[in-house]
Amino acid sequence: MVEVKEPQDYLDILQAQRGGFSFELCKRNAYLAASANVKPPTATKSGTTICGVVVKDAVVLAADTRATSGSMVADKNCEKLHYISQHVYCAGAGTAADLQHTTELMEGQMELHRLATGTQPRVCTVVRRLSSMLFKYQGYIGCALVLGGVDVNGPSLYQIYPHGSTDCLPFTSMGSGSLAAMTILESEYKDDMTIEEGKALVAKAIRAGIFNDLGSGSNVDVCVITKEGGQIFRNMEKPNERKFKAQYRGFPKGTTPVLKEDILKLVTVESGDVTMSG
């Protein structure tokens, strides 16, 4: 067992409170794993393909709609494009609960910022607050974000990692299908693209992730952000739409035998008043 050392004088107390990472529980965890057959929690792999590009006077984001729980598909048509402010949206990869609560928290903070200052928040303000919050939790909040928006400085696109690091890029992709999407973006992106060209490019990049990554799938969602605001095109493409559906065939009556049947009279109605029996 792990021995607990009692402090002898003030130097031992000072040494114990110096800070830094404490390794005291590592031996305990190893002992529990070996003797009591207690397995430590492991990270669950999540799958997503998200991307974004900067076009002329706008930013275009896109994402697939498959939510996975390990090797199972939890949701075939989930929303991965999140509203933050009128001119700032983001696409999220990682843990669904962390993404939802983080983006809702940031949406509330930016609305309070707008009411306090009387102006729309800048994109760099949102990025700075997200970066500071994620860095504080050292990667334990599973949020990988592609954030885009339009402000007084024009359109801008940012990539935010779960540990808090950020990049400002003309095009980017994240998630388990990011390599497949990046091959499309690197080969076909060009400066001063129109909005329609940008929508077609990000949709093609998401399709590459859907068809080449098992953690990505279902439909393609696209968001276009301009100086007038953002617009989400839900299920803009459905590359995996089911063409043939099995017909429902109900079991005939009597297939399962009825072993016992009871009819209980629990409520008695008398002159409009309901009284409980028993």
Image (tube, helix red, strand yellow):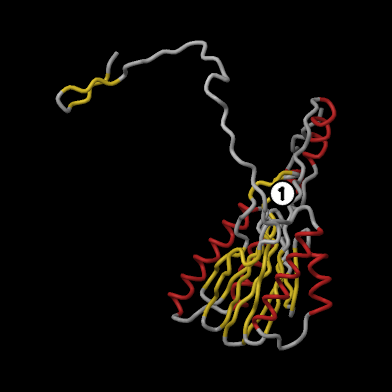
Residue 178, image x, y percentages:
78, 64
Residue at 44 percent of width and 80 percent of height:
118
Residue 167, image x, y percentages:
74, 74
Which of the 4 image quadrants contains residue 198?
Answer: bottom right
Q: What residue is disc 1 on?
A: 17
Is residue 190 placed above or below 3 in the rendered structure?
A: below
Front-most of 189 and 87?
189
Residue 147, image x, y percentages:
65, 71
Apparent side of residue 83 relative to residue 43 in the rendered image (left or right):
left
Apparent side of residue 21 relative to residue 151 in the rendered image (left or right):
right
- Quarter holding the N terminus is top right
Callout 1: helix, strand or loop?
loop
Front-most of 257 and 144?
257
Front-most of 197 and 28?
197
Apparent side of residue 170 relative to residue 195 in the rendered image (left or right):
right
Is residue 91 placed above or below 38 in the rendered structure?
A: below
- Quarter holding the C terminus is top left
Apparent side of residue 269 relative to residue 143 in the rendered image (left or right):
left
Which of the 4 image quadrants contains residue 78?
Answer: bottom right
Residue 122, image x, y percentages:
57, 79
Residue at the left extreme of this rendering: 271
Alpha-carbon neighbours of circle 1 within 10 Å: few (<14), some, or many (≥20)? few
Residue at the top extreme of this rendering: 260
User: Label 1 amino acid?
Assistant: Gln
Give the total number of marks visible in the rendering: 1
Is residue 43 placed above or below 159 in the rendered structure?
A: above
